[in-house]
Image (cartoon, grey):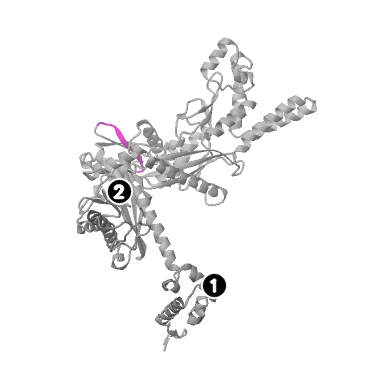
Amino acid sequence: MADPASYRPKPGEIPTDPGVYRFRDEHGRIIYVGKAKNLRSRLNSYFANPATLLPKTHAMVHHAASVQWTIVGSELEALQLEYTWIKEFAPRYNLAFRDDKTYPYLAVSMSEKFPRVQVMRGERRKGTKYFGPYTAGAIRETMDTLLRVFPVRSCSTGVLRRAERSGRPCLLGYIDKCAAPCVGRISIEDHKALAQDFCDFMGGEAKRFIGTLEKRMSAAVAELDYEQAARVRDDIIALRKVFERNAVVLTEDTNADIFAVEQDDLEAAVQVFFVRGGRIRGQRGWVVEKVEDASNAELWEHLMQQVYGGEEQQQDAIPRQILVPELPANHEYLAQWLGELRQGKVSIKVPQRGEKAALMDTVQINARQAMALHKSRRAGDLTTRSLALQELQEALDLPMPLLRIECFDISHVQGTNVVASMVVVEDGIAKKSEYRKFAITGEAAIDDTASMYDVITRRFRNYLAEKETRAQGTLASGELMAGDDEDTVEAPKSKFAYPPNLVVVDGGIPQVNAAARALADLGITDVAVIGLAKRLEEVWVPESDFPVILPRSSEGLYLLQRIRDEAHRFAITFHRAKRGKAMVASVLDTVPGLGAAKQKTLLAHFGSLKKVRAATVEELAQAKGVGPVLAQAIHDTVNASDQNLTPAPAINMTTGEILD
């Protein structure tokens, strides 16, 4: 790794003009491209104290071996040049959006002699018009329906040449799904006009074509040509079927792309709905690994550049309106640049209310689901899991493979209802049957470090007790051990399985040291302990002054983050349940032998807790299911609670004086 001081420009060398800069590694490869309104101010921030840099920036400046810059005339020129270089060099530290799935498009190759309609995926080709994206089933049905009305060529080049040589059309020509330009049934010019009509219909001019066909049908009926009228009627039905398939969500003059994002510290999932003529014409999604320290505004700027800036992009693919949750950085220049590409005005806005804001909420739900699907697929991949476990083992310098990892998290609200969770991952897969919950009381609930010490001690104390008992062979099956943890919820009589290779705690060095101290006090030395601090995703080890920094694209860091988030979710769920019970607690809950069913019966008999308190033992015994002994216990408990209550002092509301 290079020292940034070795290639830092001298003071005064960097200009204060707007421009684009690029960092290169020792082999001369460009690893990062950025733009700046003031080059000196921006570049000096990269050479600040390394301890103050975020992990991703720290890794980039130490990987680089030189920095260069180019002055431009304006921020708009900087935006254009930055995009050009990012596309040309694909720097590893710049954000790179990739499709979360391969979407099919309906494409018309207008540049060919005989334009062809086909379903296409992947890179776009010059001279081809694209419509979509669609789902795989919908696009096939749409194409099949439209070829009835617009019989444009859809066969491959080989089939076309074979038909030209033989003088006979293919099957589609015989069933009227193709105008058969290959054998001269239609001229080259008329076939291109037919393909253009196909594109116009898909581009939002459906009503014009439907109206024209309706006039033709009426004319055929007037001439008593009912066979022709029936054929035109079927064409109208086919076009309406395609036209009405897309939901009407906005006014008919609305052409907009509506974006939303769901993100965490490592990745972001972006979804977009394409609205043309007020109807949702398609949907698309991207997933990006956040290897670059970018704010939300910068994320949107990079996305706009990559989505709309391609050379193969058609001007009609850029809508009049782009709706995003947050305005991109330099949105005025970005809108100006997109307007030049579209050859028309483009506005970038944040919807605040109404139908557009409601539709953005729907897009947000799709982004959230796409993120969850991406994570589940990534977690379920065997190769990825193996790589993550291997990366962690190497980064932490552990001698044993990480077959089992346990993660602990503390949850509370201002020190009340303190609970903890333990989640288990074996071979990179969550093992929910061995999740555990802990209720924490007394001195252990003073702060997070004391709580963490208590939970780790209880977890491994049970393990040591079970280990000793198994060695002695004196514990009968199902028999309770002395000192069993009553607060552990949903645990079988055998409290815990074998010990983990790695303990992960949610927190920084204080929580890590507390967990390590608990293990040391129990005499356990073969279990590694680390902590994952959420702010910068730093990995801390006990008694260390500096964290272990894993690359932001590391599968090992992704696994740790997923485990930590699951432990946090599990702890929060238990905390909310415990807090809810505490808020509805009743004095009847403290009566020995009085369960929930009998409490309900007792309150139904008397009508209120106040009447239960006023009842005698004999009256209590008359309630269904309440005997003399239980009645006496109820009477003693509720009256004892009344005696413990200290009446509130009387206050003179005029003077504030406390009255005796």
Q: Nearer the viewer, residue 276 or 444?
A: 444
Q: Position of residue 179 (x, y in %)?
A: 62, 20
- Residue type at mark 1 is Ala
Q: Position of residue 487 (x, y in %)?
A: 34, 62
- Residue type at mark 2 is Ile
Q: Vertical placement of 372 versus 477: above or below?
A: above
Residue 604's disc is 1
Point out the image quarter for the N terminus.
top left
The residue wearing badge 2 is: 405
Label 1 residue SS: helix
Q: Nearer the viewer, residue 273 or 91?
A: 273
Q: Is residue 655 left or right of residue 147?
A: left
Q: Which residues are magenta?
A: 27-37
Query: Mark 2, residues whose alpha carbon is within 10 Å: few (<14), some, or many (≥20)?
Result: many
Marks 2 and 1: in contact by CB < 8 Å? Answer: no
As drawn, the residue found furthest toward the bottom would be 660
Q: Is residue 484 left or right of residue 640?
A: left
Residue 38's disc is none
